[in-house]
Structures are given as structure tokens and as C-alpha cells.
């Protein structure tokens, strides 16, 4: 069985997001790009399955501009065998639907028993692509999985639900599973590992080859805005303690409306 | 037939030692034949050992600077300055060592006299007054050796300190030495007994031990006993010398060789992997660290052989003292056992340890096996569990250097541990989650928490500290450091320090957003690649900003001993030519030169925690004490201070990892252990000079009942201790951002 891991390159969560002058997008200047941390869980899980002798090959699949190669190299350095990179300007501004269609298009030419990825990307937090990929391919999907067991063609997936309970699903390969925190502890891709990963095969595909692009979008971003800057804190001092407490309580009730 | 060749000769009136007295004439030739066998065996043993050392790589520089090395040998090999740091074992080892040196010189002189001088000239030079002194010295030092041996016996088998593991080789060495010394004195006693039976020999009283024993030997029995004792003494001595290279006796030579070839550079320095990134970029296979014995240099192998299992390192080790896996002694012994096993395998089976085997061993480790240096299959003639090093042992080390500092024979445990960590960190991803997160944060944002780099210099900008762009003619570059830039507690230290610099009118600047992590922690955790990437990135940025990337002629000051040590000792290899000082040193200078004046009067008593990277790595011990005294503190000391300080637990990258804590099993945290000691010192203020130490103590004090009781104990950085006593001159107050 082969495993394909869908990966996305996202801004590091510590990045300071600034908007372009016309609010049409955020400013990519000074952004540090990393492999989506949830996708790292996907890569790690695929490698563990392979190391347990239950999969033959782990392939990374990603849609993104040239820089997305760095994220792909990280996944390869972790231990994936090869990668497919759909690199096409036609995907600039593509929405979840267009990306899912492109991924499904790429997957149709590949052998896979299991598709893994993160439950969502930490940049736009859409959590929509894997589900749509499953629909395009007409295969089972189990999302937000915190434990996975693969035995032959049988896939058993555990989901954390409210109250600490586990929900257990079973399906037949091929299927798509999205990973969440707790499923594993992703290994560290060292710089030497990333350099060695340059020798691993990385195939390039165009939008035309996978049959999608931003022209397939079903949604459109019409503007961006940043959260209001946090107001300065208020310090109460001087006077009797009892008075201060009364003042704080009054403001919490009337202004902050939290009590 | 027995002859009395000397007694019948014409020189009997002189006080002298009667050789071969009462033996066959052939005895001499039997002894010569035996001596030849002994010499051949001894030389063969040493030669084999040297061959075994040569399994290692070349050790560049191990034999340069001969003059300095001879001085080291005199200081630490002959005078044994490090051995005597501990009174009891130090004294008895000195007795044994000097006892044997004098006995050896005595034996050598006798051989020269009896077997060369006399055969050539027919006379002897050991006679008369010289003989009286000569024999007295031999008896005195022989007796000292015997006393030393008794003390050693009592310590090893009665007192039984935890750090000694008694093996058969220890017992047999002690037994041999005892037999040789005892039969030596008995031979002398019997000989004097025989001589006194023939003539008045009052001069023999100078051989006071033998003279005393002579009272026991009278008449015909004395002659028989003399021959018996003499034979046992000679044979035992010969066997002893012949087998020296094959047992613990080898340490006499391996320790001297190790002291002679020891690293003379910065202390406990782990060499870099030269140009590793460039070479990898060029597609070259680069060795990451030590995974097999052939990766070590011959000097590093020799080090493991110089280890006498004295256990002083184990006594000092913070990891061992808090119940962790690491014992520096056992670590070194494991490497040694593994080396000897591999050597035996190579020699006996004539198996070339080729690349393929090394790869197999490495693959075993990669698959999660606990053995770093050997796969089970590669471990010949030993239990694999005994012969190799488990990764948990390596991760326990805080790089505090207490082991290296105390080792009487200059074994350097820390660089060996760090070299092995490189394999674990870069090749096998054998590290805990916290370590991986730390590596990822460093790779992405060049600081331990992965915070946004642009936030690092917020507070310096707020205080109006100029950057190198605002003030290119700065004298001191203040390297703020990751702790100093992000950690709220360390920021307070930085602010206090800036206040002092401004009050003293020091011309300084900060790097602003150009400053990256110094890389101390990540390098010591074994991630050499990320460290070199950091340094390269820093150099490139400096060049892009059209500044001199060597910083020649500039001075750097840090508030963190880790940055201080790394920038001072490790960056020069990458072309940096700056002069680096720690803020403790600068504060001391500013106070002594009168550039800062402090208000008098201070009701506080302080206990200073010496940072490992100041006190041990850089000998900065007096400076902080002078500064605190100038600030009016009454000082108290804890026993573990100065170069014998006890680590806070935060060095070697351990500050970023989880520490095993299971008090019910006796596994304590290092910072708890140390903070308890400092809090019980009788001071109301604990002074640190390191933000990592501060972080460790801060956490440990919060666990005690002192939480929320600010009056209970104060925890200050040395800069804060000075800043609060600052007598700011009126004309400088304007530039004081804090005022």
C-alpha cells in the first residue's frame, strides 16, 4: 500500500501579519514559511505506518508556488520517499474547492491506499480541502483523528469527542484521514536531513495536468482586516483596598460586562 | 654453591648494600634473563596498547607546544596538583606515587651500580655516606608507600565511598604492591640480621625499618629467610613490572600520556564539524558526530584509558547527584569497554572494522536501539548493555564541566558527550519532544520559543538604547541574548544593566533586529548544523548591512554566561575577532576605575551562585565577589562554590528540556537541589549572574513556602544588585531611561 500525504506551506504562526495597501491580501514580506504543523502529523503518521511494514511508499503532494518546495523538502527530510509539486501561477488565489479539485486531479494519476493530511491549515483555518478531496475521489473520509490503526486494507480511526469520549470509525482503503494533535509527535527534520532530501525525486505538475486552478473558485475573498489593537490595561491604585475592589467590580460589570 | 662474594671483597669496611650476598654466582645471570623477559613483555604490552589507541582518528595539535606540555606534566603528573585537591585520597596517592618513584630511582641506581659500574670498574659508587642517605631515603619512602597503601585499603574496603566500584584489578594491584613492599623490608631486615651476625654494622641503623626488623632475624635461620624473602621480592617485582601494561597499573603511563597530550585550548571545547553546510551543499558525505569508536581521535580513546575509575567526576555531577542516568565515570568506562571489545574483535578475529559495519551499527541506533556506539552484533566479548552508551545518558548532561574540572588526569567527558549528541540530534532524531520543538523554533525564528524576531529589541528601543546603525562608533556591543530579549525576568536584568552603562557613560549599542541567538544551547544539544546556519546567517546579515563581519577592534558584553562563552571561544573559528566580556567583568572594571559610584550602606547578606560558564569555563570567580562587596553586601559562601559550583540544571541546552522528577524514587531536579542549598546558606539575597540560572532558581523558589513572600529571600542578578545601589550623578540623570 502506498500513502500520499497532502501538505501545505503556511506562514509561521509567530509571523506578524501586515496587509497590503489595498487590503487585497497580506504582505508576504518578512514572512517565515513552514510546513503546516497539522500536516506534519500526517507525514509522521504515514512514516510510522511505513516503518511498521504496513506501507511501501510515502509520497508528498502539495499545491503551491515555488517556495512551497521548502515545506516539501521538510516532509522528505522527515522520511517521505518522493513528492509531487503542483506549481502553477494559475493556482494564485485559489480557494478550497479549486485546490481540492487540483489535488484530486493529481491523485487520480497516483497509486494510493491511504491519504493523510492535517485536519486544517493553520493559515486560513478553512478545514475544508480534505473533505472535498474525498468527495471528488468518492472515497471514505474520517476527520480530526487522534489515533489510527491500519491492518491490511482495514482502517480504524479514533476521534476525540466531547467529554473525553472516543469515537471509533472503521473503513476500507483507499480512504482519507485527517490528523489532529495527539496522534503522534512529529520527528525533527534536521538541516542535514533537508539537504540530503534534495536528492529525493520531486515531480512537478501544472494546473492543466491536474485539471484545476483559481478559475474553478467557488468563493472569493473580498477584503481583509486586522483585529483592533489591544487597548492598554487599566491599573487601579491608591486609596483603600475595599474601594479599589468596588471600582474593579463595577467596571467588570458595567464596562467589560463579564460578571 | 653459596658464596659471599661481597663480604669477601676488599671494600667491606664501607657501609654498603650487599648484593647477591649468599647466592650462587649464576643468580646474577638468571636475574638478567628474567629482566629481559620482563622488559620484552612490558614493551609488548605498551606497544599493543598504542596500537589500540590508533584505532582512533588523528588528533591534530595533541603534540604541539611541547614546552607547555612538559610544564603540565610536571604540575599535574609529577606534583599531582589535581590529585591532592581531595585531602585523604590525595595524600595517600602522593605517598604511593612518590614512594614508588623513589624506590624506582633506588632500584635503577642499584642496577647501574651493581650491574654496570661495578662490572666495569670493580668498585661501587653506592657506599659510605651516600649509602647511608640512600638507604635511609628508600626506607622512608617505602614506609610512606606502605602507609599510603594502608590508607587506600581502609578507604576502599572499609569506608567504601559510593563512587568507588571495587573490581578484581584493584584488589590485585593493591596485593602486589603490598607483597613487594613487605618482602622488600623483610629482605632488608634479614640481610641486616645476617650482616650483624658477622660484624658490627651500626651504620645499618639508617635503614631504620630493616634495622628494626633485623631484631627478628638472628642466626642461621636469617640466611635462609633472607634468600626466601629476596626471591619472592625479586620475582614479585619482576612480574609486577611485566604485567603493568595489562592491568590497572597501566594508569601510571596512560594518565601521564593523557596529561601530556591534553587539550590546551578553551576548556572542554567541542571542535566544530568544519564547513559542514558548504560540504553538504556540495553533496559530500559529512560525519555528524561519534557513532562508532573509529570516529574518536586517538587522544579521546587514550582519555578513556587514563580514567582510573576514581569517581571524583561522579561525586561532582549534578545529574548523578539528583538520581539521573548519567555518571560521567560510568560513561567514560562504557566507551572504554566498548573500545576494548572492538579492539579485541579486530585483533583476534582479524576482522577489519570497515565502513559497512559502522553503517550497520548506526542503522541499529536509527531503528531505536539503545546503543549508540555499537550494535549488539558488533560487541565482541562483552555484554552489549555494559559496553555501549545509551542515549538517555547523553541527554542528562548539563555541560556544567564539573567532571572535566575535577578529573585529576584531564579526562574531558563533555566534548565526548556533545560529539555523540550530534549523532542523536542530526541523524537519528533521538530526542524528546521538547528538544524537537526547541530545534524547530530555532530553525524558524532563531530563538528558543520561536517568537517573532522583531520583538527581541522592543525594550532596548523603549529605553533609547542606540543600535549599531544609530551609533556605529560604539565601544561596547551589548549582546542582549534570547533570554534578555524575551524573558520578562531577564529583561529586568537587561534594564538594570543598561541603567548602569548609561550612568557610567559607556559608549554602547545593540544589534537591533540583526541579533540572532548565539547558538550555545542548540550546539550543545548536538545540532551543529543549525548552529552553523545561525552563525552564517548572522555573518551574512552583517555583511549585507555593510558592516565588518569580523567585528575586529570591537568589544562585546553579554549578561548571559552562555552567550559570553560561545561568542568568546567558539565564534573566532568562524572569523569573528571581537573581544568578549561578561557583564560581571565590566561591572568590576567600572567599579574599580571609579566610573560608577555606589551608595554606601547595605543591610543585606548575599550568597553568590557561581555560573558554570563563568567560574569553571572562564575562571571568573573573584570579580563577582568584588562587585558585591563594593555594593556593600556581606557575603556568605556555600560549600559548592567557585570552580566547585553546582549547576543550576540549565546548561547544555537542558533549560529547554523536561527534567525527570520522581522524588519518591530519589530523582530530584537539579535546580531544586541547588536552590535548597542557596536558600539554606544564611543569606537573605541569592545573587546569580546568568539569566538561565535565574530562570531555574525562579522556578525552584516558587515551589517553596517562600512563594509570595518577597521578604523571605531576594533573587537578584549581579547587575540588579549594583543598579539598586547606583549613586547616579546629577548630570547623567537625563540619559537614565529608568529614572
Image: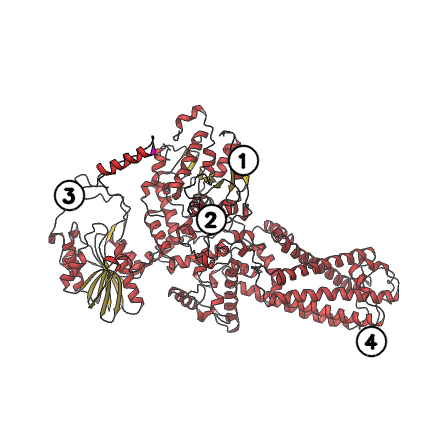
Q: Position of residue B609 (x, y in %)?
A: 50, 44
Q: Residues within 10 Å of mark 1 (few under 14, many from 20)?
A: some
The CA distance from mark 2 to mark 3 is: 52 Å
Q: Residue at the spot x=42%, y=37% of the render?
A: B477
Mark 4 chain: B
Quarter of the picture holding the N terminus of chain B: bottom right
Mark 1 chain: B
Which tag, 4 or 1, sits closer to the chain's start?
A: 4
Mark 3 chain: A
The residue labelled by disc 4 is: B1
Tell me whether the residue at label 2 lies in contact with that at label 3, contact meaning CB atoms closer than 8 angstroms.
Answer: no
Relative side of B371 to B111, left or right: left
- Say if B312 sits above or below B629 in the image: below
Q: Position of residue B650 (x, y in %)?
A: 44, 49
The residue range painted magenta reads A234-241
Q: Residues within 10 Å of mark 4 (few under 14, many from 20)?
A: few
Tell me whether the residue at label 4 lies in contact with that at label 1, contact meaning CB atoms closer than 8 angstroms.
Answer: no
Which image quadrant is residue B121 in? bottom right
- Between A167 and B303, the one lying in front of the other is A167
Disc number placed over residue B629 in the picture, else none? 1
Disc number placed over residue B648 in the picture, else none? 2
The residue labelled by disc 3 is: A223
Amino acid at each position: 500500500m502506498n500513502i500520499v500525504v497532502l501538505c501545505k506551506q503556511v506562514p509561521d504562526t509567530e509571523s506578524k501579519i501586515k496587509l497590503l495597501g489595498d487590503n487585497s491580501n497580506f504582505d508576504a514580506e518578512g514572512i517565515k514559511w513552514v510546513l503546516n504543523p497539522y500536516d506534519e502529523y500526517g507525514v509522521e503518521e504515514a512514516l510510522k505506518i511505513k516503518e511498521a511494514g504496513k506501507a511501501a511508499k510515502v509520497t508528498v503532494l502539495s499545491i503551491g508556488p515555488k517556495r512551497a518546495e521548502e515545506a516539501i523538502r521538510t516532509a522528505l527530510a522527515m522520511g517521505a520517499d518522493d513528492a509531487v509539486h503542483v506549481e502553477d501561477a494559475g493556482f494564485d488565489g485559489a480557494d478550497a474547492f479549486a485546490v481540492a479539485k487540483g489535488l484530486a486531479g493529481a491523485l487520480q494519476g497516483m497509486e494510493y491506499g491511504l491519504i493523510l493530511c492535517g485536519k486544517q491549515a493553520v493559515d486560513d483555518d478553512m478545514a475544508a480541502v480534505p473533505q472535498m478531496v474525498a468527495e471528488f475521489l468518492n472515497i471514505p473520509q474520517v476527520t480530526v483523528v487522534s489515533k489510527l490503526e491500519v491492518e491490511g486494507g482495514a482502517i480504524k480511526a479514533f476521534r476525540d469527542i466531547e467529554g473525553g469520549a472516543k469515537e471509533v470509525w472503521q473503513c476500507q482503503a483507499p480512504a482519507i484521514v485527517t490528523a489532529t494533535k495527539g496522534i503522534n509527535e512529529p520527528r525533527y527534520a534536521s538541516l542535514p536531513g533537508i539537504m540530503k532530501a534534495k536528492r529525493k525525486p520531486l515531480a512537478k505538475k501544472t494546473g492543466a495536468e491536474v485539471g484545476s486552478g483559481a478559475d474553478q473558485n467557488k468563493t472569493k475573498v473580498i477584503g481583509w482586516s486586522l483585529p483592533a489593537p489591544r487597548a492598554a490595561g487599566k491599573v487601579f491604585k491608591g486609596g483603600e483596598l475595599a474601594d479599589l475592589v468596588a471600582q474593579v467590580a463595577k467596571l467588570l460589570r458595567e464596562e467589560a460586562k463579564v460578571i | 654453591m653459596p658464596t659471599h662474594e661481597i663480604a669477601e671483597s676488599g671494600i667491606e669496611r664501607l657501609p654498603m648494600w650487599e648484593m647477591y650476598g649468599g647466592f650462587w654466582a649464576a643468580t646474577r645471570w638468571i636475574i638478567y634473563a628474567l629482566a629481559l623477559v620482563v622488559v620484552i613483555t612490558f614493551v609488548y604490552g605498551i606497544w599493543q596498547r598504542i596500537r589500540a589507541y590508533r584505532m582512533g582518528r588523528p588528533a591534530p595539535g595533541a603534540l604541539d607546544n611541547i614546552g607547555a606540555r612538559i610544564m603540565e606534566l610536571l604540575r599535574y603528573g609529577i606534583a599531582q596538583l589535581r590529585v591532592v585537591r581531595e585531602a585523604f585520597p590525595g595524600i595517600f596517592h602522593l605517598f604511593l606515587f612518590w614512594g614508588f618513584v623513589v624506590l624506582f630511582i633506588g632500584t635503577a641506581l642499584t642496577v647501574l651500580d651493581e650491574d654496570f659500574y661495578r662490572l666495569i670498574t670493580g668498585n661501587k659508587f653506592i657506599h659510605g655516606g651516600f649509602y647511608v642517605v640512600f638507604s635511609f631515603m628508600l626506607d622512608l619512602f617505602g614506609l610512606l608507600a606502605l602507609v599510603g597503601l594502608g590508607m587506600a585499603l581502609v578507604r576502599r574496603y572499609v569506608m567504601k565511598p559510593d563512587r568507588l566500584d571495587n573490581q578484581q584489578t584493584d584488589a590485585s594491584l593493591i596485593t602486589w604492591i603490598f607483597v613487594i613492599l613487605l618482602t622488600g623490608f623483610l629482605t632488608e631486615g634479614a640481610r641486616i640480621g645476617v650482616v650483624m651476625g658477622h660484624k658490627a654494622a651500626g651504620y645499618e641503623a639508617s635503614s631504620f625499618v630493616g634495622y628494626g626488623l633485623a631484631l627478628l632475624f638472628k642466626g642461621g635461620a636469617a640466611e635462609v629467610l633472607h634468600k626466601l624473602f629476596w626471591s619472592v621480592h625479586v620475582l614479585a617485582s619482576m612480574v609486577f613490572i611485566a604485567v603493568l601494561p595489562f592491568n590497572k597499573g597501566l594508569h601510571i603511563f596512560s594518565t601521564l600520556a593523557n596529561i601530556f597530550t591534553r587539550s590546551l585550548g578553551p576548556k572542554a571545547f567541542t571542535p566544530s564539524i568544519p564547513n559542514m553546510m558548504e560540504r553538504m551543499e556540495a553533496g559530500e558525505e559529512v560525519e555528524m558526530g561519534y557513532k562508532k569508536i573509529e570516529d574518536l581521535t586517538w587522544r579521546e580513546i587514550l582519555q578513556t584509558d587514563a580514567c582510573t575509575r576514581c569517581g571524583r567526576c561522579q561525586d561532582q555531577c549534578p545529574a548523578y547527584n539528583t538520581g539521573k542516568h548519567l555518571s560521567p565515570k560510568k560513561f567514560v568506562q562504557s566507551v572504554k569497554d566498548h573500545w576494548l571489545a572492538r579492539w579485541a574483535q579486530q585483533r583476534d578475529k582479524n576482522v577489519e572494522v570497515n565502513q559497512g559495519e559502522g553503517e550497520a551499527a548506526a542503522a541499529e541506533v536509527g531503528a531505536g536501539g539503545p546503543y549508540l556506539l555499537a550494535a549488539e552484533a558488533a560487541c565482541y566479548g562483552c555484554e552489549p548493555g555494559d559496553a555501549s552508551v545509551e542515549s538517555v545518558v547523553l541527554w542528562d548532561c548539563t555541560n556544567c564541566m564539573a567532571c572535566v574540572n575535577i578529573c585529576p588526569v584531564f579526562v574531558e567527558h563533555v566534548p565526548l558527550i556533545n560529539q555523540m549528541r550530534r549523532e542523536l540530534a542530526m541523524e537519528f532524531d533521538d530526542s524528546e519532544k521538547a528538544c524537537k520543538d526547541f530545534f524547530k523554533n530555532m530553525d524558524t525564528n532563531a530563538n528558543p520559543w520561536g517568537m517573532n524576531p522583531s520583538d527581541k529589541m522592543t525594550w532596548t528601543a523603549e529605553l533609547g538604547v542606540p543600535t549599531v546603525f544609530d551609533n556605529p562608533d560604539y565601544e561596547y556591543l551589548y549582546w542582549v541574548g534570547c533570554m534578555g530579549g524575551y524573558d520578562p525576568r531577564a529583561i529586568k536584568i537587561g534594564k538594570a544593566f543598561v541603567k548602569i552603562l548609561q550612568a557610567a557613560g559607556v559608549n554602547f549599542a545593540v544589534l537591533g533586529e540583526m541579533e540572532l541567538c548565539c547558538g550555545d544551547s542548540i550546539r550543545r544539544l548536538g545540532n551543529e548544523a543549525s548552529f552553523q546556519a545561525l552563525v552564517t546567517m548572522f555573518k551574512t546579515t552583517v555583511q549585507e548591512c555593510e558592516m565588518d563581519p569580523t567585528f575586529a577592534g570591537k568589544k562585546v558584553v553579554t549578561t548571559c554566561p552562555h552567550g559570553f562563552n560561545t561568542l568568546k571561544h567558539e565564534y573566532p573559528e568562524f572569523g569573528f575577532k571581537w573581544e568578549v566580556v561578561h557583564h560581571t567583568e565590566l561591572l568590576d572594571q567600572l567599579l574599580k576605575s571609579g566610573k560608577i559610584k555606589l551608595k554606601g550602606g547595605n543591610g543585606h547578606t548575599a550568597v553568590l551562585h557561581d555560573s558554570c560558564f563563568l567560574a569553571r569555563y572562564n575562571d571568573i570567580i573573584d570579580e563577582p565577589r568584588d562587585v558585591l562587596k563594593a555594593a556593600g553586601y556581606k557575603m556568605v559562601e556555600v560549600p559548592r562554590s567557585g570552580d566547585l559550583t553546582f549547576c543550576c540544571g540549565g546548561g547544555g541546552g537542558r533549560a529547554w528540556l523536561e527534567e525527570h522528577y520522581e522524588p519518591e524514587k530519589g530523582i530530584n531536579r537539579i535546580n531544586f537541589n541547588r536552590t535548597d542549598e542557596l536558600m539554606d546558606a544564611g543569606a537573605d539575597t541569592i545573587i546569580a549572574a546568568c539569566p538561565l540560572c535565574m530562570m531555574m532558581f525562579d522556578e525552584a523558589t516558587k515551589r517553596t513556602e517562600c512563594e509570595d513572600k518577597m521578604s523571605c529571600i531576594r533573587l537578584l542578578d549581579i547587575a540588579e544588585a549594583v543598579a539598586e545601589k547606583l549613586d547616579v550623578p546629577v548630570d547623567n540623570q537625563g540619559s537614565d531611561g529608568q529614572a
